[in-house]
Image (cartoon, rainbow, N blue to C red):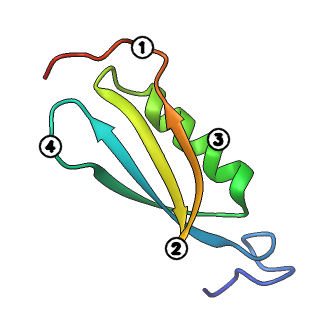
Amino acid sequence: MPGAGPGGPLGGFVKTYIIYIDDSRYTVPTMDTLVVSGDARARELAAARLASSVHYQGAQIWEGERLVDTLKSSRPPTPA
């Protein structure tokens, strides 16, 4: 990725993460991509995304074939 190396505009190397969000309105997860500096930032953004809708029940964060984390909503399930 251009600019992703040390001293680049992105401030260093970055990783690509895939987030699968369980949405009570759909039968398949919604997929989103994050390009961030590391696991902690991926968790932070995934948690913010999870909190952004009452329909979001959980999220899985993947970096390639590695499962980074599984997040669950603290809200009760919302009907579609």
2 and 3 marks in contact (CB < 8 Å): no
Of the two numbered discs 1 and 3 in the rendering, the one whose residue sits closer to the viewer: 1
Q: Earlier in the sequence, mark 1 or mark 3?
A: 3
Of the two numbered discs 2 and 3 in the rendering, the one whose residue sits closer to the viewer: 2
Determine which residue is flagged by label 2: 65
Task: Find residue 15 and report its image quarter.
Answer: bottom right
Task: Please identify the residue farthest to the right as the structure is shown.
Answer: 7
Determine which residue is flagged by label 4: 27
Which of 7/66 is in front? 66
Residue at 69% x, 72% y: name it. Answer: 14
Between marks 1 and 2, how big is the CA–CA gap?
29 Å
Between marks 3 and 4, how big is the CA–CA gap?
25 Å
Q: Residue 77: where, in percent of width, then height?
A: 30, 17
Q: In the rendered view, does 25 fall on the left or right side of 51?
A: left
Q: In the rendered view, does 30 fall on the left or right side of 71?
A: left
The kind of residue tagged 2 is Glu
Determine which residue is flagged by label 3: 44
The kind of residue tagged 1 is Arg
Of the two numbered discs 1 and 2 in the rendering, the one whose residue sits closer to the viewer: 2
Say which quadrant the C terminus sits in.
top left
